[in-house]
Amino acid sequence: MSFAPLRAALATLVALAAVLVLGLGTAAGTARAAAPPAGKPAFQLPFACGTTWQLDTWGHDPAVDIMAEGNPGSDGRPVYASAPGTVSAAYWDAGSGNTLQISHGNGWFTAYYHLQEAPDTYVRTGQAVTGATLIGTVGKTGRNSGNWAHLHYEQRYRASGGFTDERDRVPVHFDGVEYSGAQAEWPSVTSRNCASPQPWSGCPAGHVCFWSGTGGTGTVCTTAVNVPSSTCGLRRSFFNNGDPQPGYDHAYVTFAEGGSQCLHHGWAEGRGDFPAGGRTIRSVTWGGECP
């Protein structure tokens, strides 16, 4: 009696089991510490150091979609270059919306889709950038965004030429770790792009600093006294760099649009968040305990 058919059937079952196991591992989004190809830049998440993000490859592996962890609201979050390079293209595309490409040398590129503002708002074609360069903010432009705010991000390789397309996509690496695989998701990845500006930077002790952008970016207004005519449109404020100062424990802010809010040092990390969308400060008054 020949056992060849039986052995063939067993081999087929083993192969199918291996496919299933690999498929489950990919769906779970296990980040692989696979070494990037030789010469690939040390790409980092294109967001401020220490912030956490959710990544997935649904329907577009090896590209990734990125949103704030838990997706509490990604719209308007600042986007930085993944590595030093030169802006090679800034353009509108019907599918990807406001789009940037950055050349990082030796044939390596990154692409950023669905940016909120026009692609030349913060940078221009031919401009040198670093990980500390603000290149745009998360948006939902272009028909392929699905009308929800996220960053579609790609790493690409083309040996020659200054413009790439999706045929040049390669698996994404951040901080030396590979994030790829069909239908994969990583719910919490921390950015190590520590060249990017940090929240609270440049805010003198004893002052309240108001930023027009999210995450400590954009125009900064600082005050340690009542300023009746401040015109800083704001999204978030940071107080005293998180350090209490005698006599400067509470600040009452009124808005031109109506209403007021009190910043209280007792809040988490000594900061108070104003509603997103931008409001105009009418006045800031230092006072006692918040009601």
Image: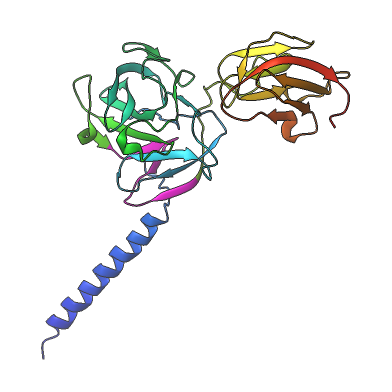
* Quarter of the rendering occupied by the N terminus: bottom left
Vertical relation: 229 (above or below) 179: above
- Residue 215: say if magenta: no
Q: Residue at x 20, y 35 (%)?
A: 167
Residue range highlighted in magenta: 170-187
Q: Is residue 183 magenta?
A: yes
Q: Quadrant of the C terminus?
A: top right
The percent coordinates of residue 143 (x first, y second) are 31, 35
Residue 245 locus on image (x, y percent): 84, 20
Q: In the depicted view, which residue is nearer to us: 56 or 95?
A: 95
Query: Going by the image, does 78 lie left or right of 250?
Result: left
Q: How is the image coloured?
A: rainbow
Residue 191 visible from this viewpoint: yes
Residue 62: quarter of image: top left
* Farthest front residue in view: 258
**Residue under the image location 70 percent in, 12 percent down:** 222
- Quadrant in the picture for residue 230: top right
Query: Above or below — where is 97 with respect to 90?
Result: below
Q: Nearer the viewer, residue 30 or 46?
A: 46
Residue projecting furthest to the bottom: 1
Query: Residue 119: horizontal and vertical position, in percent?
Result: 36, 19
- In the image, taking residue 75 as reference, residue 179 lies left or right, namely left
- Residue 236 rendering spot, x and y as whole percentages: 63, 25
Residue at position x 50%, y 28% in the image: 76
Residue 37 seen in the current view: no
